[in-house]
Amino acid sequence: MPKYTVPLTGYANIAVTVETDETDPEAIAELAQEQVYVSLCHQCGGHTNSSLEVGDEWEAVRREHGTPEVTKE
């Protein structure tokens, strides 16, 4: 019987905490995007007939008026 490989797309989220004296949400979001790092363990990444890949392009979540969602801790 023939085998087929089919790429499937999903959705993932991550929150990145950055330390900065910057107050501009755009600049803070850019810092977070520069510092994001995501990896998967071997088991979570897949097995013999499938694999899970996490992309390397991340966008800041934006509020209704367009500014990045930034929460000060």
Image (cartoon, rainbow, N blue to C red):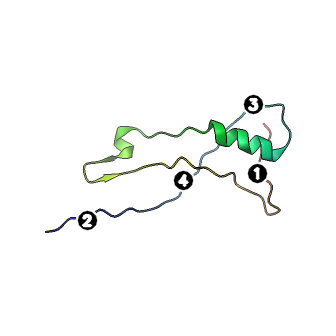
First reached walking from the N terminus: tag 1 or tag 2? 2
Q: Earlier in the sequence, mark 4 or mark 2?
A: 2
Mark 4 is surrounded, within 10 Å at the Cα level, by few (under 14), some (14 to 19) or many (20 or more) other residues, namely few
Which residue is under mark 1? 69
Q: CA distance from mark 1 to mark 2?
A: 40 Å
Crowd tier of the residue under label 1, counting other residues whose Cα lies within 10 Å: few below 14, some 14–19, many 20 or above: some
* Structural crowding at the residue carrying mark 3, measured as other residues with C-alpha within 10 Å and reported as few (<14), some (14–19) or many (≥20): few
Examine the image and state in which quarter residue 66 appears: bottom right
Name the secondary structure under disc 4. Answer: loop
Q: Which mark is residue 12?
A: 4
Q: What is the distance, in whole Å, between disc 4 and disc 2 at their CAs?
A: 25 Å
- Identified at 79% across, 31% down, the residue is 20
Q: Position of residue 23 (x, y in %)?
A: 86, 39
Q: Measure how far apart labels 1 and 3 are at the Cα level.
A: 16 Å
The three-letter code of the residue at mark 1 reads Glu
Q: Is residue 35 left or right of residue 8?
A: right
Provide the residue designation for mark 2.
4
Mark sitting earlier along the chain (2/3): 2
Going from the N terminus, do you reach mark 4 or mark 3 first?
A: 4
Residue receiving disc 3: 19
Q: Residue at x 69, y 51 (%)?
A: 60
Mark yes or no: residue 33 visible: yes
SS for dot 1: loop
Question: Dot 2, crowdedness within 10 Å: few (<14), some or many (≥20)?
Answer: few
- x and y percentages locating residue 10 in the rendered image: 48, 60
Q: Is residue 60 above or below residue 65?
A: above
Q: Quadrant of the C terminus?
A: top right
Q: Amino acid at mark 3?
A: Glu
